[in-house]
Image: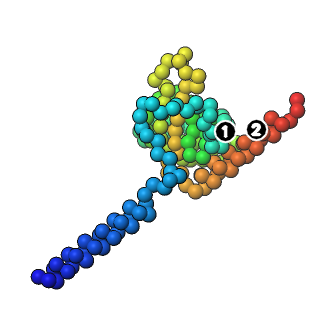
Amino acid sequence: MQMVWFMTMIVFTVAFFLIFLAVYFFRPKRDDKIIPVNLERELIDPEEISLPNRVEPNWPATIKTSSGKTAEAIITSITHGSGFITSTMKLAIGKKFQLTIHLPDRSPLQLRAEVTWSNLHLPVEKVVNQGMGIRFIEAGEDAVCLINDTIAQHAMAVKAEETVPS
């Protein structure tokens, strides 16, 4: 009986020690900003949000759904992990599809993508750019490197065009 009591006390002591360490070392730090979720929080102006290396390449692309339907698309904006495409095909939010990007001077890039938002259900006169926001999923390391490289090259080319006097 004493052995059971002794083992129980050891288990509880070790559990208490582990919980104490977890709470002590993984608690929020003073520098961590926790924004309360309430209706009174100040809204951020979208113009003040910096976009991480976003370029507007207008690359042609092809969408292929899991049901085998295909459609032509244009990637009008792209970042390292997401993009905006225009297409005649209307896909539901959360729909996954195969995206083939036809890059200039390179072989086509095949990626899996998912629709994150869409304004295709709105009337044309209500939106400036009608299309879908997508995020890249299941992108291999080669694809990520190629996108990063292409974005960097495109951004440098656009800056070079802006600095050339007319």
Please tell me which residue is depicted at 52% across the width and 45% down the height of the picture: 136
Residue 55 numbered mark, or none: 1
Front residue of this view, candidates 8 and 79: 8
What amino acid type is highlighted by mark number 1?
A: Val
- Give the percent coordinates (x, y) of residue 38: 41, 34
User: For the point 51% across and 32% down, which residue is it?
Assistant: 42
Q: Which corner quadrant of the image does residue 77 belong to? A: top right
**For the view shown, which residue lies furthest in the right direction?**
165
Q: Which residue is mark 2?
A: 158
User: In the image, residue 135 lies at what x, y percent?
Assistant: 52, 42
CA distance separating discs 1 and 2: 9 Å
* Left or right: where 98 falls relative to 156: left
CB atoms of marks 1 and 2 within 8 Å: yes
Q: Residue type at mark 2?
A: Val
The residue shown at (16%, 83%) is 3
SS under mark 1: loop
- Residue 4: percent from left, percent from top: 16, 80
* Residue farthest toward the front in the current orientation of the protein: 30
From the viewer's perspective, tell me whether residue 134 is left or right of residue 12.
right
Against 147, residue 56 (above or below) is above
- Report helix, strand or loop for mark 2: helix
Q: Is residue 49 visible?
A: yes
The number of callouts visible is 2
> Where is 62 relative to 27, above or below?
above
Q: Residue 113: percent from the left, percent from the top?
A: 50, 43
- Taking the image as shown, residue 64 lies to the left or right of residue 53, namely left
- Residue farthest along the left direction in this orientation: 1
